[in-house]
Image (cartoon, rainbow, N blue to C red):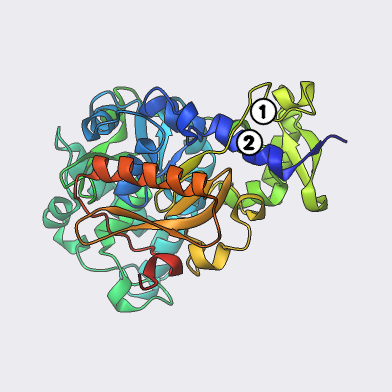
Amino acid sequence: MLHVSDRQRRDRIALRHGIDPARRRADAEDATRAVAVLHATEPATVHLSLQARVDGLRRSDVERVLHEERTLVKQLAMRRTLFVLPRDLLPAAWGSASARVAGTERARLAKDAEAHGLADPGGGAAWVERARREVLGVVAGSVEGRQAAEVRAAVPALAAPAPVAGAPSSSVPPTVSRLLTLLGAEAEVVRGVNTGHWRVSRPRWAPMAAWLGEEPRPWSASDGWAELVRRWLGAFGPGTEADLVWWLGSTKGIVRAALARLEAVEVALDGGATGWLLPDDDLLDHPLDGARGQEVGPWAALLPVLDPTVMGWKERAFYLGPHRDALFDRNGNAGTTAWWDGRVVGCWVQDEAGRVLVRLLEEVPAAGRAALEAEADRLSDWLAGERVGTVYPSPAMRAPA
């Protein structure tokens, strides 16, 4: 069995993910494809993940591909997480990961509706169907889409919170918001034009068919899961079964079926784990050269909260080393990261003036410190004094200066 070392895996990050300054991507769409999808839980992550991968990127470039050209589209999918997907990946996600999320959301909402008197016993599913149709009708009635507040005003009976079993009342979203989440997972509606700042999410919800100019046609579940696995292996492979189960938010059975369908190839990883590659991966033709004949020198990068590279694997030791507890919160959400030579060596924060400051968690050679400072200057110039907040600060980010 072919053995792929951690060093080779780190070199492949440089080659494929566009975060090596010598190998940045041409534009926002190319940069997104390089990592399969972008995390979009926090709106600033989309812009900052692309800024890290595209030289000369402007905020307007991101808004154009999201809201005008619509070649990148926001979609609730794997792990009930909001992502930005290349448009051609949407049907695969709709039929697999998004459908799985939608089924869970629908069942949970029906159960909560019955438990709290919004529906009669046994009538939760019918209540959800009536409510979702009412909300969908409001959204479909506007060419430009509706903000959530406008939908709540149009259907006041659904404006109150629908309590969630086990959740404190202060954290429960309005029923309309839960229904919009369900409709989004079902590809009935989409988060369209953002009416807020690029760092704030205030979308107009629009019918998916109107947004795309065509009716959504989900792939079959098996086709969809296989395509998601193919894209992940192309960007992140080799990775383990556990990596895929976690990233997809699926089951071992789903992952194993997709790997078999793709005829994925087993490889050995450092530490004894089994990884997987696509059958046409260059590494299989050049087993001693994870860099495909290209020399990968030391490189520096600063990535934002929840960047897709940092969040690409469940088993992260090969690039994270001993820093997991310092750089992730208790729920597994990554804060900002500073990279040197394929490994995470710290994080970054901003001072009161908005300048980017690197915080190292280990010794880095002078060349690495200089390269990281150059990346900090590049990011500071792009932000131009704007400070980016987050609800996922890592312990390293919160630590006193």
Percent x, y of residue 321: 63, 58
Pick whichever, 143 or 32, lies toward us: 32
- The image shows residue 25, relative to residue 82, as above or below, that is above
Q: Is residue 152 left or right of residue 252?
A: left
Count of all numbered marks drawn on residues in the image: 2
Q: Are marks 1 and 2 in contact (CB under 8 Å)?
A: yes
**Label at residue 225:** none
Residue 276, given in percent of the width and then of the height, sits at 74, 38
Rounded to the nearest angstrom, the CA distance separating label 1 from label 2 is 6 Å
Q: Give the residue number, with chain letter if any, for mark 2.
A: 11
| Residue shown at the point (67%, 39%) measured from the top left | 9
Res. 71 image quadrant: top left
Q: Which residue is mark 1?
A: 291
Quarter of the figure that contains the C terminus:
bottom left
Question: Which secondary structure, mark 2?
Answer: helix
Q: Residue furthest front?
A: 366
Q: Earlier in the sequence, mark 1 or mark 2?
A: 2
- Residue 272: give x, y in percent of width and height: 83, 51
Q: Amino acid at mark 1?
A: Ala
- Element at label 1: loop
User: Which quadrant: the N terminus?
Assistant: top right
* One can see residue 100 in this view: no
Q: Is residue 148 visible?
A: yes
Q: Give the residue at x 62% y 54%.
A: 314
Residue 400 image position (x, y, % from top left): 36, 73
Residue flagged by tag 2: what amino acid is it?
Answer: Asp
User: Along the horizontal axis of the image, is 240 left or right of 219?
Assistant: right
Q: Quadrant of residue 205?
A: top left
